[in-house]
Image: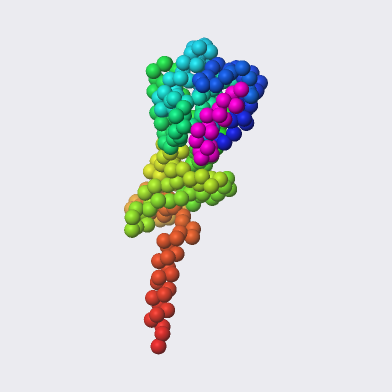
């Protein structure tokens, strides 16, 4: 996360209730004013960098709390910054104790000691890699799924991504067709974006849009790739049809009683797969490619009517 105001950022992490300054580098820690002045003095080495404030949060499971003394937290902060390639710059480390989950805030200057900019590109991807490495290295608790993530602490893209994961997984448990899933998600202001195989109408991927942010299904959660979602919807649909068939099998029907005609509904040849395939086909309303093809056909027909 990046920002433009050291004053606002320092005040937020230092003056919050139950905040404890653990240490820093290149700044005076005596009070908020000194910290802000020192950060701002170095940012003047590169005044063209508007968003010079770097803000990171490291959070652990409450099960790891006994392992995390103030000294250890400071060591982990330094290790994290090194692995993230955030070096030769000012930083401030503050522990917040307002939640059950141990966590620290790291504020750093994106203008390094030589006046060069510290890039924030690919930081999200690198962060995931570094956090996993450190978790395994130090034997911290590794959550098996997203259920233990504290949603209230999330902001920005992470917050949207988890909202998408929770909402889509709930909806997909009951949806028996793509059209049904689209309708349910639309009511939650979530739009489905299909990716087609080049030159065809064959769907090969899916993304989700909410609040102007777009995420690939597999990036939201592995279970939300197009292939896995399609399998889930297929299973739901077949389960629904089996329930209908079970009910119909128990219904008496006026059919001939000859041996050759004594066939229950469940034993009759079924066109169920074709019907299921039809129901499972994604509904594409106002598909741009389809509209374009229809317009071309109309123009061709209109040309043939001229005398």
Colour convention:
rainbow
Residue located 49% across and 30% down the image = 146
Q: Quadrant of residue 107?
A: top right
Asked if residue 133 shows in the view, the reply is yes
Left or right of 14, for residue 293: left
Residue located 44% across and 27% down the image = 86
> Taking 137 as reference, is 251 above or below it?
below
**Quadrant where the C terminus is found in the figure:** bottom left
Residue, far bottom: 307
Number of marks present in the image shown: 0
Q: Give the residues drawn in magenta, as a range.
A: 34-51
Q: Residue 89 location, x and y as percent?
A: 47, 26
Residue located 37% across and 57% down the image = 201
> Taking 24 as reference, is 198 above or below it?
below
Left or right of 34, for residue 238: left
Q: Residue 179 location, x and y as percent?
A: 49, 52
Residue located 57% across and 36% down the image = 4
Q: Residue 32 location, x and y as percent?
A: 63, 23
Is 299 contained in the magenta span? Answer: no
Decide which of 156, 199 is in the foreground and name it: 156
Decide which of 104, 211 is in the foreground and name it: 104
Q: Residue 45 location, x and y as percent?
A: 50, 33
Q: Quadrant of residue 117?
A: top left
> Taking 192 as reference, is 140 above or below it?
above
Decide which of 212, 51 is in the foreground and name it: 51
Asked if residue 151 shows in the view, the reply is no
Is 35 contained in the magenta span? Answer: yes
């Amino acid at each position: 996360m990046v920002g433009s105001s050291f004053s606002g950022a320092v005040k937020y992490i230092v003056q919050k209730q139950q905040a404890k300054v653990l240490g820093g580098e290149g700044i005076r820690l005596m009070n908020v004013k000194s910290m802000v002045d020192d950060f701002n003095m170095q940012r003047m080495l590169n005044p063209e960098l508007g968003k010079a404030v770097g803000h990171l949060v490291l959070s652990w499971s409450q099960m790891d709390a006994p392992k995390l003394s103030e000294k250890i937290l400071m060591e982990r902060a330094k290790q994290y910054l090194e692995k993230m390639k955030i070096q030769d710059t000012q930083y401030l480390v503050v522990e917040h104790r307002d939640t059950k989950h141990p966590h620290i805030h790291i504020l750093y200057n994106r203008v390094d000691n030589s006046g060069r900019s510290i890039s924030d590109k690919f930081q999200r991807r690198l962060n995931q890699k570094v956090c996993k490495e450190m978790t395994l290295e130090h034997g911290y608790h590794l959550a098996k799924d997203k259920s233990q993530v504290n949603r209230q602490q999330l902001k920005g893209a992470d917050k949207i991504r988890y909202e998408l994961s929770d909402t889509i997984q709930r909806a997909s448990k009951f949806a028996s067709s793509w059209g049904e899933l689209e309708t349910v998600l639309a009511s939650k202001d979530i739009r489905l974006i299909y990716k087609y195989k080049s030159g065809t109408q064959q769907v090969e991927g899916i993304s989700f849009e909410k609040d102007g942010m777009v995420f690939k299904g597999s990036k939201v959660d592995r279970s939300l790739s197009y292939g896995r979602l399609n399998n889930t919807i297929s299973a739901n649909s077949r389960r629904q049809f089996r329930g209908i068939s079970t009910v119909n099998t128990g219904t008496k029907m006026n059919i001939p009683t000859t041996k050759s005609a004594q066939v229950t509904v469940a034993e009759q040849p079924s066109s169920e797969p074709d019907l299921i395939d039809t129901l499972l086909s994604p509904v594409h309303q106002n598909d741009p490619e389809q509209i374009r093809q229809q317009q071309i056909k109309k123009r061709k027909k209109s040309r043939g009517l001229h005398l």
